[in-house]
Image (cartoon, rainbow, N blue to C red):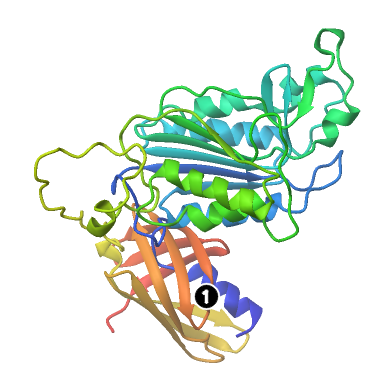
Amino acid sequence: MNRREFELVLGLGGLAAFTGLGGASASADGKRIGLVIGNSAYRNVPALPNPANDAGDVAAALNRLRFAVTLLTNASFDEMRRGLIALGRDAAGADMAVVYFAGHGMEISGENWLIPVDAELKRDTDAANEAVSLRSVMLQVSDTTSLGLVILDACRNDPFAAKMQRSLAQRSTTRGGFGRIEPVGNVLVAYAARDGTTALDGDGRNSPFTTALLHNIEKPGVEVTFIFRNIRDDVMEATGNEQQPFVYGSLSRKAIYLAGQPSSTDQTGTKQANATPAATDAPSPVVPAPPPPAVDPTLVGTWEIMVPSDHGLSRWIWRITGDGTYKFRAEGPRAAKPHEGTITAMNGHWSLHAIRGLAGWDDGGSYEVRDATVVITGKLGTGYWKRSLQ
């Protein structure tokens, strides 16, 4: 398959839901919103190697966990500001809202700041006009019914602090890393390194903190506070105890799961943090909640589209099943390679994971059903698929 065909298959061919593949969480019907920012290409200080990679990988994981995610890479101040405003509007009344930021961050006089790629920060007093305050980020995720979560892999040694001119009133009050915070309500804030310390970039594709986050966040049956306990231990082991992640905030006893509730056998074992205590009399049999439907019923069936090329028209055919699987084949000149995998499709959003043929590919976007036609928009384009009689 040539590159153009490959892009068309992936950009136009997915029929699934934006929600992830790992059967999700505490509220099957709950709205989940996410904003992921990865700032690597800073314009006025040396670039960071990992944040863009970290953000892309975290956005994909949140997609699979049924979050409607906006991904910003190398975002300016205005882009970060507008992204947070949009997130706050969408998060109002949602079940969960998550903000993940990787890049430079610092504390100035007790205020914590996330730094856009276009910041200059010649003086400490410039932060209010060139950076985004952590306090405003927490505010945007605070109006949810279950959880507002802010994850910051942004406590690196900060070159802005070294060159910044300090005002007389704020001498010696700028430091690398973030300062301690006290979130209120149902907001948790996770630092890659505890207050007053800095985090490591690492030598791989992802930082040690984000590596641990990706390893743990999609594990089903693990309550959210235990996810970050596991991340803490993984990071400390990976860094020889040089870096200790830390979580700030306090939740109620209600157990919150990102990747699905524990099975009945899990619930009889070790008790999760924040779980509601069980009654002391004989427990009722645990009946697991039925999983949410994998695919919108209106998408179940066979769909086709005609794709032009230099060698004529190819007919592409997708078979979508209600159990969350698909099969693709093509007919015609230089037909695209057949492939199959898992899909979800619900509430106008889709996500696809290829297992055979194009193994390892993930994509996501939106869909709209119009009688016998469905309009699919993915990473690389939009396609109009017609229902097939096959």
Q: Is residue 161 visible?
A: yes
| Depicted 38 relative to depicted 345: above or below | above
| Depicted 380 relative to depicted 74: above or below | below
What residue appears at the point 79 percent right and 32 percent down from the top-left corner?
119
SS category of the residue bearing label 1: helix
| Depicted 100 relative to depicted 362: above or below | above
What residue appears at the point 41 percent right and 62 percent down from the top-left corner?
375
- Position of the C terminus, as image quadrant, is bottom left
The number of callouts visible is 1
**Location of mark 1 (residue):** 9
Percent of width and height locating residue 274: 34, 36
Q: Quadrant of residue 78?
A: top right
Percent of width and height locating residue 24: 35, 53
Q: Is residue 321 left or right of residue 150?
A: left
Q: Is residue 207 visible?
A: no
Tag 1: amino acid: Val
Q: Quadrant of residue 84?
A: top right
Pick the residue in front: 122 or 161: 161
What residue appears at the point 43 percent right and 67 percent down from the top-left corner?
384
Percent of width and height locating residue 73: 67, 48
